[in-house]
Amino acid sequence: MIHLKHIIITGTSRGIGESLANQFIDPSHHLICISRTANQGLMERAKQLDCQMDYFNYDLTNISGIDQLCEDIFSRIALPSSDEAIYLINNAAMLTPVSPIERLETEQILENLHLNLLAPMVITSNFLQLTKHLNVDKRILNISSASAKYILPSQSAYSTAKAGLDSFTKCIDIEQKLAAYPAKAAAVYPGMIDTSLQSEIRSVSTELFPYVNEFIQLSEEGKLQSPEYTASKLIEILISEDFGKNVLIETIN
């Protein structure tokens, strides 16, 4: 009998999330993908390779609807055996707005913090509530950023959200050590990756972001990791026997 791993991944329309989902496609996995727009390629590949996939089109900046989203997700998950596992990867993120704080509209700040910090908190809250009675392997991987630690101008919303995500992960770790059936948690800085977030920052004017030329240079010199490489390293971390021993992982190399 195949013992399923149920893997919930946010932000699977592109970038790291898409690469994570692609590499997890396997008959022994049940993938639950969440993104604002559906990834048809992922769904077709999962079908071809006989991997169970449930895809949820949802805008995670809509915080008030996440409770219902999680109920819908868990209605598709059956965990009859302690040999099974359930993993959550909070990956969805946005870099914008890249600008000095005084130039930002309130709605821009809210959207950034909703997606980068509040959505992972609310999803994790639901995940732990809905699995607390289950004696199974439970893991939460939060995709953070070195921007939480190494501060640059014009990234206040993003850096603040990621620093909050790090603190949140540390809190989960402490709380879960007291739980009857604890989940393990870790936050990871995945490095500089060639994704749409990097494209966004390279398109910002030097007036709004003084370091833009350094980011352009990194790209031109081929110093950005591919999403595929990054995803493979993140999966190594997630499935490792030591997962959760280090709550904050600052390098994946």
Image (cartoon, helix red, strand yellow):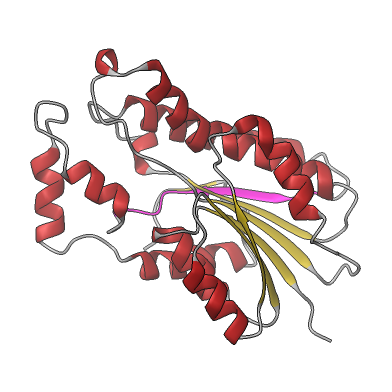
Image quarter in which the N terminus is found: bottom right
Q: Is residue 105 above or below residue 39?
A: above
Residue at position x 24%, y 44% in the image: 200
Horizontal and vertical percent position of residue 241 = 65, 67
Horizontal and vertical percent position of residue 155 = 29, 30
Q: Is 89 inside the magenta-drawn segment?
A: no
Q: Is residue 172 visible?
A: no
Horizontal and vertical percent position of residue 99 = 24, 25
Bounds of the magenta segment: 182-192
Horizontal and vertical percent position of residue 238 = 58, 62
Residue at position x 22%, y 26% in the image: 153
Q: Nearer the viewer, residue 147 or 72?
A: 72
Image quarter in which the C terminus is found: bottom left
Residue at position x 42%, y 27% in the image: 160
Residue at position x 36%, y 42% in the image: 146
- Say left or right for 163 vs 215: right
Q: Nearer the viewer, residue 56 or 251?
A: 56
Q: Is residue 246 above or below residue 99?
A: below
Q: Nearer the viewer, residue 185 or 1?
A: 1
Quarter of the image for residue 29 reads: bottom right
Q: State how many labels appear.
A: 0
- Say left or right for 194 vs 65: left
- Say left or right for 115 vs 9: left
Q: Is 189 inside the magenta-drawn segment?
A: yes
